[in-house]
Image (cartoon, helix red, strand yellow):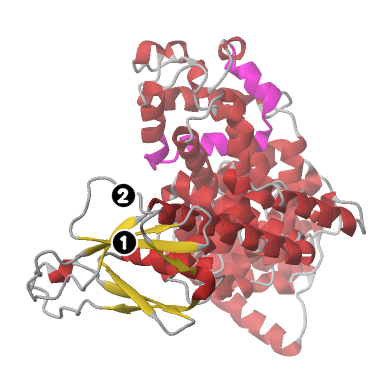
Amino acid sequence: MDYNRINQSLKELRQKQQKLDEPTGITYVKGLKQAILGPDEMAKVNSIVVLAKAMEFLPRSDPIFALFDSQLFAYLLDAASLPHTANESMKAVLRILLTFLWGILPETRSPTMYDPLLWNLCDNRPFFESLAAKLADQDIRLALSMVDFVSQLLYRTVELKNAEIMLSEVRCMTDAHFFDTVSMLPYDFKARLDSFAALRKSSQLVLRYLSASSLSSEPFPALINECVIAMTRMMSECGSGRNGTAGPSAANSDYSKVGLPESAAADPQNYIQQHFSPVAAIDLICMLKNPNMTFKKNFSEHTMFAGEATYFPLLKFAVGITELLSHMDTVKYSNFNLIFSYFNGDLYYSFMSSALKFWMASKAEQDDFGHIMTLLETLVAYCDSMLRTESFSSVTDQVISLKYSQIKKFQLEKLRLVKAAAWSESMGSFNGAIGKQVMDFVKNQRFLELSKGSWVYVQNPLDESPAVSGKPVYYFLVLSSNNKSLIYREFIRKHAHAPNIDKDGIVIEFKDVAKIDSKPMTEKIDAENMINVSSRLNVSRIEIYTKDGNLFSFYVDSLGQLYSWLDGLKMLLNDNSALSDDTMYQIDALTKIRTDIQLIDLADRQELKFGDVKHDSLQLESLAASHFYYE
């Protein structure tokens, strides 16, 4: 019976809402199977589509289920792995596979009932590569079928607890970058995949099983040698063998250059067996095979100049990064909800590249491993913040190019926000004390500048009228030793050294001052090409009004002098309003630095006993009283 007649029969059954009886079902499956295994390509493709339709009409039957054997699945998987397989053909194959995995066809169940499909999927990398490639088409129905299939496949594999099949499937998916590709899909598209949550759950079950397995038990020991081979090849490519020469074999590689102590460097296989899980081994192998040369170039540069104490501990980071990404808290980092952080070669590679980059930039030594891992934990938060607006592929690219200084800045800002939030209820008086101390500090700076004195002009230096011989041109101004008055004296010329005018200078008591003001005297030059002496000066007139109506004024020719005298004199009068932008910037910057550094010494709120508010206030008061900025 050909596929056309079967297809017509299925249409009639759908209209009648009936199922096939067992004999007819056997006849249909046999006929379609024969066409699928036959030489006619057109009949093969059409028969696959019709068989997919027939799956929902087949009754429970052991004889029918037995027809779905290893040979049939081999042909179906090959058909789905062809480079130009149509989306409809791929959907049909997935529908057949998924119905088989649901276990709704056989009447009698057995532990080996799924073996014909599962063993065909083992080491079938082309099929999983085809799945990953088809995901890029963003066909929602096809994507749903693929996610459903992989989810059910992983559930069945975990249910059977067959470690060999499980390892093979995970290796195929990581090599094909399946989970990377799912993660790269647009967020709104992934949100429409109803079975995404099921895929995450089934993949986490596999992750948990492999993480708890030992590399010493079958079938995992082969991963140990594969790790060593991949690592040796990488070291050879980077010229990190013994004596800095490249070599093709492990015997020519110095494993101390991947951070192993001398005792472990002699037997890296044993180190890997003792410290690695199968998941960590798979991640490392996948990373070392990555065609991206960023890590290898940096590693080669690093080993040229590093010593025994500073070699990058590759194997320790391999385990640490796997643990970090495998236990991602998607409640805390909610933007990872639609991202697979495990079995994700692209994400793992970007984190390993960053670890090496941070290690080199910080000139870290072996004891600093924990500090760099803390930075990688901060990198998770950085990625989470980026994922709010950026695509997954864009984030991994930016992580690889991220500088050490940038992640440190992000880490400090994150720490500041955490501490500020934890202590927000008790920060009122603390901020007030810090603000007062910073203002006092800036005042002291200004007073110190004014107490040294400076030369200013009697008249506007921009005036073009000729100077009268013997007429004073300069004032020397200085703050009195008790900070209560301003002393000045006229001079015809500047002296090389600051004169002492305490006895013969004119005194203006600050208690008699009513107002201090300034006026800019320099005209703005609009023409860009007009350059003259006047345009290079910033001349301002500072006016001091006394309570009895007198006015004393002088001129300064730089912004530095203006800020020192105008702001300094205002502060002496306790007038902190309308201070210059320069002085306010200094005050704000010092306040922020002082607050941030002091908060680092505070415990997190959750570290304190419930209701210990008095202790909070006392701790803040002691910090505020420490006068940190003077030390």
Q: Which residue is drawn at the image coordinates 86% and 59% (left, top)?
A: 107
- The reply to whether the C-beta atoms of the residues labelled 1 and 2 are less than 8 Å apart is yes
Please report the bounds of the magenta region as a residue range: 267-295
Q: Would you name the residue on which mark 1 appears?
A: 489
Q: Position of residue 116 (x, y in %)?
A: 68, 47
Q: Is residue 331 visible?
A: no
Residue 2, by quadrant, is bottom right
Q: Can residue 603 be seen in this snapshot?
A: yes
User: Which is nearer the N-term, disc 1 or disc 2?
Assistant: 1
Residue 281 falls left or right of residue 607: left
> Which residue does the image show at 78% across and 59% down from the upper left?
103
User: Whole-percent x and y of residue 310?
Assistant: 50, 23
* Residue drawn at the location 82% of the way across and 57% of the way down: 617
The amino acid pointed to by label 2 is Pro
Q: Is residue 239 left or right of residue 122?
A: left
Residue at 83% of width from left, 49% of height from top? 607
> Which image quarter is the N terminus in?
bottom right
